[in-house]
Image: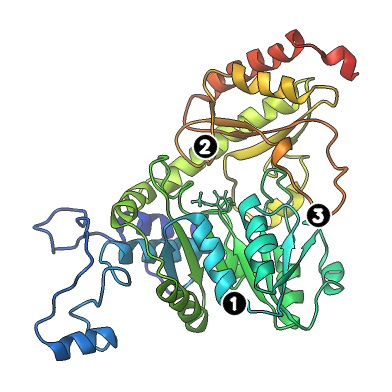
């Protein structure tokens, strides 16, 4: 993220804050980092002190491990800093960070708008438990214009939920236009900004509440489960904070500590992985077995112009569509043949990953967009030339399988 995107009034650049924020100061014998505070009970000198701490009138003592933990505070500050908001609340997983604000803002009889390309478990929650609670959801075309969104808004549309680019299919949404239309209807704008961490400033584009799966690039080492919700107003922060307390949601101090450590290198990792991803994407776009590359950062790819307008960079996660004619079995054989790409969920770590995704794509609207098999790649910190060589041998495997490219042509 370019430093000039930071809200004004801060003395140092954002990248400097990634290094200097949330340190121990002089509290731990001069050690740079804070220790991990594991804790449930907080002992108080007197009962009156306990009452004061519970009422947040007394700064010296925190009230309870589930609500306040000195290892979580610096991470919350750092996340708010990266997202450009005022405050953040941590949750135990990225999915919890999706669900809790939806529960906090919606009630029975409300209407929710979600893009059809939303992260699968977010859709599952809307169609399952939320529907059971009497919340109706309309799934919309992720590339919808503000004008077309207007027609979908109802008086009871309480939340517009965005996720850009979309999971698996990477459609870029016109966040500022959609947010402006929603606000005209008194609708809150929530956004899953996991792909855009470090590169998309949600609050400068009209978002009210920004959700992060910190499990991904923030942790950065595939060893943490964590989520966050960042807000840009005290009012929204209290809603989100209250939901965490009422629903018994908290985060592990060990995971928070690891995430804080991961964030120290966020800028270098993300910038490096983006460059590698672009190199790999450019290679793939030229291979005859690949119909298209779904990477908004790639010139000519779907959503590139809007990505360029709104983002300062890109995550190293993208999709490819194979030529129609290659079967699901062949897409699986391609994934199986890769030596440097692990087959696995999640992303944002230091290691490259591959998953065939056609089977995971659920759409409420008719989906004739893709005629070939979809495969999602996450580019890690390996040398891009090695990854490219591995992908080329993997594409060769497509031809040794039953229905070859000749059948596709
Ligand atoms: C992974 C992911 C989540 C959920 O994060 P977890 O920490 O795995 O629960 C939410 N949204 C998006 C877009 C994700 O990719």
Mark found first going from the N terminus, 2 or 3: 2
Residue 148, x across and y down, in percent: 87, 68
Closer to the N terminus: mark 3 or mark 1?
1
**For residue 70, which quarter of the picture?**
bottom left
Q: Nearer the viewer, residue 356 or 187?
A: 356
Front residue (pair 121, 216): 121
Provide the residue designation for mark 3: 364
Residues 128 and 331: in front is 128
* Residue 273 horizontal/vertical position (percent): 52, 37
Q: Is residue 17 left or right of residue 406?
A: left
Give SS at disc 3: loop
Q: CB of residue at label 2: within 8 Å of ligand 1?
A: no
- Cα separation between marks 2 and 3: 33 Å
Tag 1 secondary structure: helix
The part of the image, by quadrant, that contains residue 36 is bottom left
Say if 251 sits above or below 267 in the image: below
Residue 150 shows up from this direction? yes
Q: Quadrant of the C terminus?
A: top right
Pointer 2 local density, CA inside 10 Å: few below 14, some 14–19, many at least 20: many
| Front residue (pair 71, 44) | 44
Name the N-terminal-most of marks 1 and 2.
Answer: 1
Residue 110 lies, with reference to residue 354, above or below; the image says: below
Task: Name the residue tied to disc 1.
Answer: 105
- Quickly name the residue at label 2: 273
Q: Secondary structure at mark 2?
A: helix
How packed mark 1 is, by other alpha carbons closer than 10 Å (few <14, some 14-19, many 20 or more), is: some
**Left or right relative to 338: residue 149:** right
């Amino acid at each position: 993220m370019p430093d000039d995107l930071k809200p004004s009034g801060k003395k140092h650049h954002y990248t400097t804050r990634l290094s200097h924020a949330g340190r121990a100061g002089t509290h731990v014998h001069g050690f740079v980092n804070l220790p991990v505070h594991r804790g449930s009970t907080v002992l108080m000198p007197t009962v009156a002190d306990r009452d004061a701490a519970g009422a947040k009138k007394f700064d010296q003592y925190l009230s309870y491990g589930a609500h306040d933990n000195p290892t979580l505070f610096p991470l919350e500050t750092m996340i708010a800093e990266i997202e450009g908001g005022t405050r953040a609340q941590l949750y135990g997983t990225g999915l919890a960070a999706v669900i809790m604000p939806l529960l906090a803002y919606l009630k029975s009889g409300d209407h929710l708008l979600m893009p059809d390309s939303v992260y699968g478990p977010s859709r599952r929650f809307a169609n399952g438990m939320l529907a059971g609670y009497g919340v109706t959801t309309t799934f919309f075309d992720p590339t919808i214009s503000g004008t077309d969104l207007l027609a979908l808004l109802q008086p009871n549309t309480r939340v517009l939920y965005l996720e850009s680019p979309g999971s698996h299919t990477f459609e870029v949404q016109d966040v500022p236009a959609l947010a402006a239309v929603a606000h005209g209807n008194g609708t809150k704008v929530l956004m899953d900004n996991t792909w855009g961490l470090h590169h998309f400033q949600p609050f400068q584009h009209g978002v009210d509440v920004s959700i992060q799966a910190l499990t991904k690039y923030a942790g950065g080492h595939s060893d943490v489960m964590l989520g966050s919700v960042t807000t840009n107003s005290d009012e929204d922060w209290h809603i989100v904070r209250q939901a965490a307390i009422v629903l018994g949601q908290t985060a592990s101090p060990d995971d928070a500590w690891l995430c804080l450590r991961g964030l120290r290198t966020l800028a270098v990792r993300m910038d490096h992985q983006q460059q590698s991803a672009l190199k790999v994407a450019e290679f793939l776009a030229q291979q005859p077995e690949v119909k298209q590359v779904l990477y908004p950062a790639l010139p000519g790819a779907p959503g590139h112009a809007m990505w360029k307008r709104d983002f300062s960079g890109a995550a190293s996660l993208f999709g490819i569509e194979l030529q129609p004619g290659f079967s699901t079995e062949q897409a699986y054989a391609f994934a199986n043949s890769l030596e440097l790409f692990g087959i696995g969920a999640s992303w944002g770590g230091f290691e490259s990953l591959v998953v065939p995704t056609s089977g995971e794509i659920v759409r409420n609207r008719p989906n004739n967009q893709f005629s070939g098999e979809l495969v999602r790649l996450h580019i890690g910190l390996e040398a891009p030339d090695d990854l490219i060589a591995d992908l080329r041998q993997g594409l060769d495997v497509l031809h040794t399988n039953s229905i070859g490219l000749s059948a596709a042509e």
